[in-house]
Image (tube, rainbow, N blue to C red):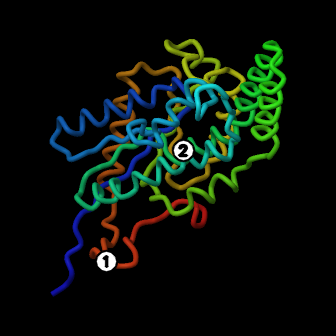
Amino acid sequence: MAAFTPKRGCLVVFEGIDRSGKSTQARLAYERLTKEGHAAELIRFPDRTTPIGQVLDRFLANASWSSDGQHPQVPPPQLTHLLFAANRWEAQARILRALGEGRTVLVDRYSFSGIAYTVGAAPSVAETEATRLRREAEASGDVEKTAEAVAASTAATGAPVDATFCRESERGLLAPDAVFFLDVAPQETQKRGGYGDEVYEKLATQERVYQVYRQFDNLPYWRRIAASSLSIEELHEKLFEQLKSVIEATQPDQLLPLGSTGDGRRRLWSTSL
């Protein structure tokens, strides 16, 4: 008897710069899928409920952290990227299980955000925060505190970071069936409510992030959606039509039994993926 290969779930990612509307659209798509009786799961990155996610939550609020509450440090971009990557890695078993059970997994940010923000934004954010801490230390007149701030600043801003480094830490993550990139100009998103609440939400920073995102345009599953001129409802309808077509076209990758050496799924950054 031929082996039965069950219909697997579909992995779809929503990407975009801050305040582009991707979180809203991911939520609306999830709610509509479930309302229409389709098994689905929504995952957001960073997942701030995990121990690693809680560290990232503090970083996103301040761009620095302190182990003792007295000596703030600015982490180098390489370290913050590895933490963001680890946050995605710790969700892989959950994603794979959901796909194997036939659920569509909608992901709000994924590896592409990690690369875009680390390459486009993290170095300048680290430098700005390090400069602030150094000036505060110098103003206090505390020689020891100033020396520590200078050392932390050097560590945070000394080594360059590039896309190759970022991809290596995420090589092997499950590859998506589709990525919806909500294309909204940074000059437009800065006008939206809540802008500026987190460390990356500066116009110049978002412009650099946007340029890195555009380097993904040639990926086979990348779908750039012009979103600036559409209402929330119009954008939802446009995205949902494409989402349905992706789900319907999903091929049942070979799902190997538990204990096997592989799972038959495509993996990110293994070739051109």
Q: Residue 168 appears in which quarter of the rendering?
A: bottom right
Q: Is residue 185 left or right of residue 154?
A: left
Q: Secondary structure at mark 2?
A: helix
For the point 44% across and 50% down, which residue is it? 178
**Badge 2 vs badge 1, beta-carbon distance below 8 Å:** no
Q: Amino acid at mark 2?
A: Phe
Distance CA(mark 2)–CA(mark 1) = 28 Å
- Above/below status of 19 relative to 79: above
The residue nearer to you, when weighing 57 against 182, is 57
Q: Which residue is mark 2?
A: 84
Q: Position of residue 166 (x, y in %)?
A: 64, 52
Quadrant for the C terminus in the image? bottom right
The residue nearer to you, when weighing 29 against 243, is 29
- Above/below status of 45 relative to 228: below
Q: Secondary structure at mark 1?
A: loop
Q: Is residue 84 left or right of residue 76?
A: left
Q: Mark 2 or mark 1: which comes first in sequence?
A: 2
Q: Position of residue 151 (x, y in %)?
A: 81, 36
For the point 20% across and 45% down, which residue is it? 38
Quadrant for the N terminus in the image? bottom left
Q: Which residue is mark 1?
A: 259
